[in-house]
Image (tube, helix red, strand yellow):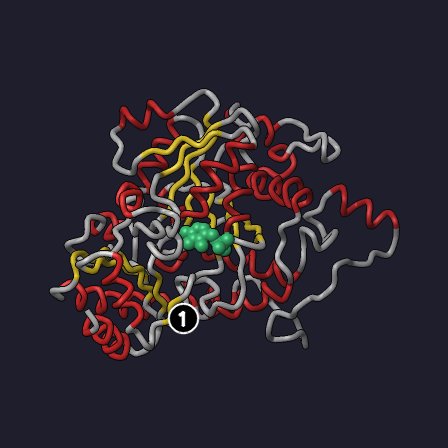
Amino acid sequence: MKDETKCLHAGYHPKNAEPRVVPIVQSTTYVYDSTDDVAAVFDDPTKSLIYSRFANPTVMAVEEKIAELEGGVGAMCTSSGQAASLLSILNLCKAGDSFISSHHIYGGTYNLFAFTLKKLGIECIFVNDDATDEELEAAIKPNTKCVFGETIANPALTVYDIERFANFAHKHGIPLIIDNTFATPVLCKPIEFGADIVVHSTTKYMDGHAVQGGGVIVDSGKFDWTNGNFPELTEPDESYHGISYTGTYGKLAYILKARMQLMRDFGMYPAAHSAFLLNLGLETLSVRMKQYCENALKVAKFLKDNENIEEVIYPGLETDKSYKLAQKYLKGASGVISFVIKGGRSQAVKFMDALELASNEVHVADIRTCVLHPASATHRQLTDEQLVAAGINGGMVRFSVGLENVDDIIEDIKKGLAAL
Ligand SMILES: *Cc1c(COP(=O)(O)O)cnc(C)c1O
């Protein structure tokens, strides 16, 4: 099936007289005929459902749909994108291990990697996307367990050279994890370029309507965990009656370990109702992504020619520094644009406050156009000098183009520009 069809049909196949739409199974628990039946589920949790902290039929329908869209063998939903990133790393790293991450990642992920995981004894080594081969090699240590990057970075909007980093990771016997939130599987399927694990904040385009927060981890099933670097996946797990994940589950080892061990212990599983809402968003994902890209490209071209705009960052523009990578990896550059207004912070604020259609909010990738001034919001604690050091210009605006008619969006931007 093609993406448009998977968005509508994957993950749920009703039988005779069953509901057409995936039902919300609002039950924390499941009944069994006998004690032996319960015991059998504990012996092999893939056979049926144990408990809603890590399994629910509504959520699992969505997991299957996303796994099929990404071309993976299995997926596990989480209650936020942050939870997905955290578990994707904890499933491989324990105290004393390290991993490598791109510098160009979401701010929340940066905090998680640079500060919180450090407190847990896991070291993140940040490398530049354009690091030389020598610089990359220098970041590898005997305890390095994975490499992490974002397809389209939020908010830098750089495109990650997935194939290059996949080859680098595989050369060292470790997997590549890709945060594919901004691209979604409609614009990029990282597994086709060698990624082993894909994570998302489903809060963004996948949901698309700003109604649920969530995340997901997808397993390609392609990585060989038996290469000696991952005893936690191959050796008996004493917390799960001595199971070996690779021995028992083969290609599903990573994603089943995440569910049976980490989700069991941390409990960041989404509610059935949230999964139902996410599924509604996923049904139109393919159609929506095409329109976001079309609208955003028009907006980016309009901005590029304006005298009040210093710079437009959008990987779909031929002049953008990520354009070549975008041509290779993306079917479209998503709806998010960053641009810098001449005159810095005060001018950006004037522009933002004159907008009427675009809403000022801490969100991105919504169905409605929304806009954020990083210097006043996500990076508010920083001085102008620190902003520059962090690569954020006081005049920078992050503009998330929605699905309104693009002429109306451009009219609104004109109002902002007129205020300057
Ligand atoms: C928002 C975001 C996250 C975090 O997701 P939440 O659902 O807000 O926890 C992770 N990665 C990227 C690229 C994001 O944009």
Residue matched to label 1: 367
Q: Is mark 1 within 8 Å of ligand 1?
A: no
In the image, is 363 to the left or to the right of 307?
Answer: right
The image shows residue 233 at horizontal and vertical percentages of 59, 32
Where is residue 314 shown, x and y percent of the image? 24, 57
Who is closer to the viewer here, 353 or 20?
Answer: 353
Position in image of residue 194 (x %, y %)? 38, 41
Give the position of the N terminus as an image quadrant: bottom left
Q: Is residue 256 above or below residue 281?
A: above
Residue at the (56%, 56%) spot, across then down? 63
In the rendered image, residue 205, in percent from the top left (x then y), is placed at 42, 62
Q: In the rendered structure, which amino acid carries the disc numbered 1?
A: Ile
Q: Secondary structure at mark 1?
A: loop
Query: Looking at the image, which is closer to me, 204 or 64?
Result: 204
Position of 71 with respect to 152 (left or right) is: right
**In the rendered image, which quarter contains the C terminus?**
bottom left
Quadrant of the image occupied by residue 251: top right
Residue at 74% x, 53% y is 51
Residue 92 picture quarter? top right
Q: Is residue 296 visible?
A: yes
At x 45%, y 26%, the residue is 144
